[in-house]
Image (cartoon, rainbow, N blue to C red):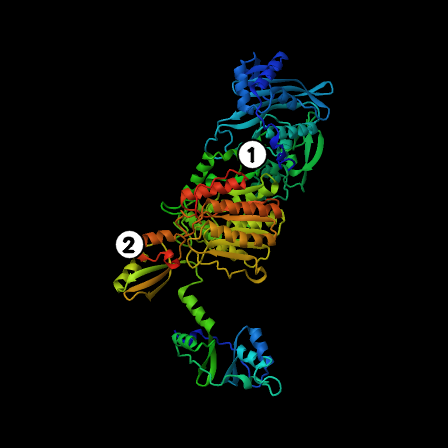
């Protein structure tokens, strides 16, 4: 999945000459934490609520006379950016490793969007269907596509709708299959899968 | 609605002591000497005369052991014969009783007297006291246990206008017989005078078929006179007291003859014209009906049980968790436990569609109706199995909650348990899921607002599954506090109801989700109930508490992973009653949701019902948790 599909396109930006107060107001009004600083469509830098707080904190370096007045003075200039062709995986790794909150997306020198941590989380929530109706079952499989096929066959035979199916590596020789089923009668599904020889993680496993 | 509030609870200590047998024997001796005790037998020739109050013949005094046996059976020897006669032959408003005698049949006691005003004989009264053992009232389709004590008003006639006296006398009697442990007044159909009076006093029609005909006639009348009455309003009536109070805003004429009988059509025999409110005029001009009135329930709180056989008509395939077996098992347990005698059994009604449309989209309901009519096996999702009777059963389930709300707001009961299915709390505005089609508590909340003018409703949902349908319907409504205790959504259907969901927009703060981790039991449940639920309801000050009472948080229930026992349900029920007492006159309407292992479901529901009744002997059969 590409960044271009998940990035936010309606951007709130500031020119470098904007005052710190103006920038703070913008952040608050839009409930965001990052403001790209632009000149026309060209990205000059990024300013965060933390940057603003540090600059205006009494006693902080540069407070008092000669304190910074504009966004241009406090912004980060060497911004790590993404391009729309980068993948969500790229974005996740950068955000995670460099502990950024958001990454501007630049296409041919032009600012076209921004990807924040919350956008990545939304992507995950959608993928795992966490907000949808259903219950997650955790089925432990041998690392063998034959087993995966057998599981999907077994699911096909049940009178329930499968909302999502995620296959994750578990032990060196195991998969954990996360199956989200839309039925209230989960007991029946568990029973039928166990009867078909599948190992289902017991809930008590998670509390020991 | 005059005396439907029923006898007070203060008379509990009257007649508490069992009298020594010698005292009873001595009284019998005295009364026999005064010729105030006779034997009696039914005489078929006399029976043919109706309404005379003399359908028996006095015979010789039966042997003492029979007198004693009847006395013990009826009164448990808690009142002496002389004392009883004194209470019955009471003088009120200048009216007294003369020639008051007691007549003993094999198993009954009759009280017979003349009514005097000053020195003039103005009437006659016969009461018949017995314990019924067959099923006389078609409440639930199984025989009632023997033992319910009944006062049968065999005959009352008064030659003068003296309804004030009759009223005062029967209120006195109601208290007396309540204190003596009697359960019901019954009324003979041939008592044609006082048809309106009996209805107003809370007597109900004993024969449901007869009641339906009365309702049909009322609708015919409204239609014939072209009155601004909707058929739905008439169809909603379930009690004679509702008929008596029906549309007091509309007045219609009735004509009276010399004897005091009314007709609704003018003729030569009925010259005097009167204007009466619709319900009153209608009843004054109706044929007589068989009536009864519950005067005694041996529980501190009067609890209505909403029940209909039609709930069994929502057929689901064998092996489906939500089957009719749940209700038949509950019904059997209610009988086995002897609860039927103390529950005020109330029939649900098919609500008008406007009541359902307040919550659900018409197109959605229509699709559901069509699916059931077409013979579809399920609707919307495979969980929601349906049969031909499912649509009507679902509407009737919502109507059951409405009937429970009627019972509580009219004062016929203090609280109510609605044994309805299909359940409702997963159903959204246009969404069937999780065995639910119509959101019963939501329809109830909307109905309580429109019919009884209240605003703040609390819906407490302790089903093991999150009541997502109810939450969706009310999350923006600041007047509805929705509190749900359920298994955590990461582990349990429907996967919603997280703690951070606190309502939306104006309704922010009036949704409270309390998820419990798998394997949580009574201790955890009771703990969050006390720490979070009680303070939230306390602060909200509801005018009505609706319970979405599922019993699937029980440790034996297969469909969730919580490990509660009856103890938690008893504890929470007591807590809810205490909150309701403080804020809304004890008004709690409990609505059945889930609960799928029949044994644990039934044990929990019975414990819940007994607690609603205020019984102290509530058992907690399974320990631990």
Location of residue A190 in the rendering, given as x and y in whole percent from the top left corner:
34, 54
Q: Are marks 2 and 1 on the same chain?
A: no
Q: Nearer the viewer, residue B198 or A196?
A: A196
Q: Nearer the viewer, residue B441 or B246?
A: B441
Chain of residue at mark 2:
A
Q: Kindly tell me whether residue B52 is visible in this rendering.
A: no
- Can residue B214 be seen in this snapshot? yes
Which residue is most to the front? Answer: A59
What residue is rendered at 58% in x and 74% in y? A29
Q: Which secondary structure, mark 2? A: loop
Query: Mark 2 to mark 1: distance in Å?
Result: 54 Å
Quarter location, residue B412:
top right
Question: What x and y, as percent, mark residue B608?
Answer: 50, 43
The answer to which of B236 and A116 lies nearer the viewer is A116
The residue to which callout 1 is attached is B297
The subunit letter for the residue under badge 1 reads B
Please say if A3 is above or below A42: above
Q: Secondary structure at mark 1?
A: loop
Q: Residue A164 location, x and y as percent?
A: 37, 62
Q: Which labelled disc corresponds to residue A196?
A: 2
Compared to B505, does B53 lie above or below? above
Rendering quarter of residue B244: top right
Quadrant assignment for the N terminus of chain B: top right
Residue that appears at 58% across and 46% down: B578
The dot on residue B500 is: none
């Amino acid at each position: 999945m590409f960044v271009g599909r998940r990035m936010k396109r309606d951007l709130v930006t500031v020119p470098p000459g904007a005052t710190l107060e103006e920038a703070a107001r913008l952040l608050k009004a839009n409930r965001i934490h990052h403001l790209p600083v632009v000149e026309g469509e060209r990205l000059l830098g990024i300013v965060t609520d933390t940057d603003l707080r540090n600059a205006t904190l009494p006693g902080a370096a540069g407070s008092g006379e000669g304190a910074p007045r504009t966004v241009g003075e406090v912004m980060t200039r060497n911004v790590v950016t993404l391009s729309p062709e980068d993948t969500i995986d790229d974005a996740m790794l950068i955000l995670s490793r460099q502990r950024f909150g958001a990454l501007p997306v630049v296409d041919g020198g032009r600012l076209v969007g921004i990807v924040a941590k919350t956008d990545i989380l939304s992507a995950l929530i959608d993928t795992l269907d966490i907000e949808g109706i259903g219950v997650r079952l955790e089925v432990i499989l041998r690392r063998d596509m034959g087993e995966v096929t057998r599981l999907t066959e077994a699911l096909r035979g049940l009178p329930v709708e499968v909302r999502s199916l995620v296959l994750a590596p578990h032990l060196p020789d195991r998969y954990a299959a996360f199956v989200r089923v839309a039925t209230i009668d989960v007991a029946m599904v568990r029973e039928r899968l166990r009867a078909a020889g599948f190992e289902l993680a017991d809930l008590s496993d998670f509390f020991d | 609605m005059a005396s439907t509030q029923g006898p007070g609870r203060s008379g509990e200590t009257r007649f508490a002591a069992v009298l020594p047998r010698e005292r009873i024997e001595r009284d019998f001796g005295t009364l026999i000497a005064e010729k105030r005790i006779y034997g009696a037998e039914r005489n078929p020739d006399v029976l043919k005369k109706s309404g005379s109050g003399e359908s028996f013949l006095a015979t010789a005094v039966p042997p003492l052991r029979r007198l004693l046996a009847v006395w013990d059976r009826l009164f448990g020897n808690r009142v002496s014969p002389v004392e009883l006669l004194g209470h019955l032959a009471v003088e009120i408003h200048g009216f007294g009783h003369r020639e008051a005698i007691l007549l003993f049949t094999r198993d009954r006691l009759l009280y017979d007297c003349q009514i005097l005003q000053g020195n003039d004989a103005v009437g006659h009264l016969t009461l018949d006291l017995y314990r019924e053992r067959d099923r006389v009232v078609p409440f639930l389709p199984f025989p009632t246990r023997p033992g319910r004590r009944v006062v049968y008003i065999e005959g009352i006639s008064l030659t003068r206008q003296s309804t004030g006296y009759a009223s005062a006398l029967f209120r006195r009697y109601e208290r007396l017989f309540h204190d003596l442990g009697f359960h019901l007044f019954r009324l003979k159909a041939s008592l044609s005078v006082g048809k309106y009076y009996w209805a107003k006093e809370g007597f109900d029609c004993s024969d449901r078929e007869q009641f339906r005909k009365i309702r049909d006639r009322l609708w015919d009348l409204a239609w014939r006179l072209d009155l601004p009455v909707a058929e739905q309003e008439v169809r909603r009536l379930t009690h004679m007291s509702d008929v008596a109070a029906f549309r007091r805003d509309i007045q219609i004429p009735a004509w009276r003859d010399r004897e005091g009988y009314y007709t609704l059509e003018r003729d030569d025999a009925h010259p005097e014209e009167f204007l009466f409110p619709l319900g009153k005029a209608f009843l004054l001009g109706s044929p007589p009906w068989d009536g009864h009135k519950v005067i005694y329930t041996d529980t501190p709180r009067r609890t209505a049980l909403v029940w209909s056989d039609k709930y069994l008509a929502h057929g689901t395939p064998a092996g489906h968790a939500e089957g009719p077996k749940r209700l038949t098992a509950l019904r059997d347990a209610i009988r086995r436990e002897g609860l039927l005698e103390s529950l005020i059994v109330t029939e649900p009604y098919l609500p008008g569609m406007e009541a359902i449309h307040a919550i659900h989209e018409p197109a959605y309901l229509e699709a559901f109706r069509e699916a059931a009519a077409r013979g579809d096996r399920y609707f919307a999702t495979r969980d929601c199995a349906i049969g031909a009777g499912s649509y009507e059963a679902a509407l009737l389930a919502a109507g059951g909650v409405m009937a429970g709300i009627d019972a509580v707001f009219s004062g016929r009961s203090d609280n109510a348990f609605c044994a309805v299915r299909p359940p409702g709390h997963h159903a959204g505005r246009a969404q069937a899921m999780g065995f639910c089609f119509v959101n019963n508590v939501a329809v109830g909340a909307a109905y309580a607002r429109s019919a009884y003018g209240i605003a703040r409703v609390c819906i407490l949902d302790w089903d093991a599954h999150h009541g997502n349908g109810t939450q969706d319907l009310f999350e923006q409504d600041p007047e509805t506090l929705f509190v749900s205790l359920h298994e955590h959504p990461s582990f349990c259907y429907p996967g919603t109801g997280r703690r951070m969901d606190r309502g939306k927009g104006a309704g922010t703060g009036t949704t409270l989700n309390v998820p419990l981790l798998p394997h949580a039991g009574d201790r955890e449940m009771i703990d969050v109930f006390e720490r979070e639920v009680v303070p939230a309801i306390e602060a909200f000050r509801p005018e009505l508490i609706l319970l979405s009472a599922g019993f699937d948080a029980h440790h034996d229930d297969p469909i969730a992973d919580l490990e509660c026992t009856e103890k938690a349900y008893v504890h929470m029920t007591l807590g809810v009653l205490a909150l309701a007492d403080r804020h809304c006159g004890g008004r709690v309407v409990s609505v059945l949701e889930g609960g799928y292992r029949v044994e644990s479901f039934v044990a929990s529901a019975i414990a819940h019902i007994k607690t609603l009744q205020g019984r102290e002997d509530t058992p907690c059969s399974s320990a631990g948790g």
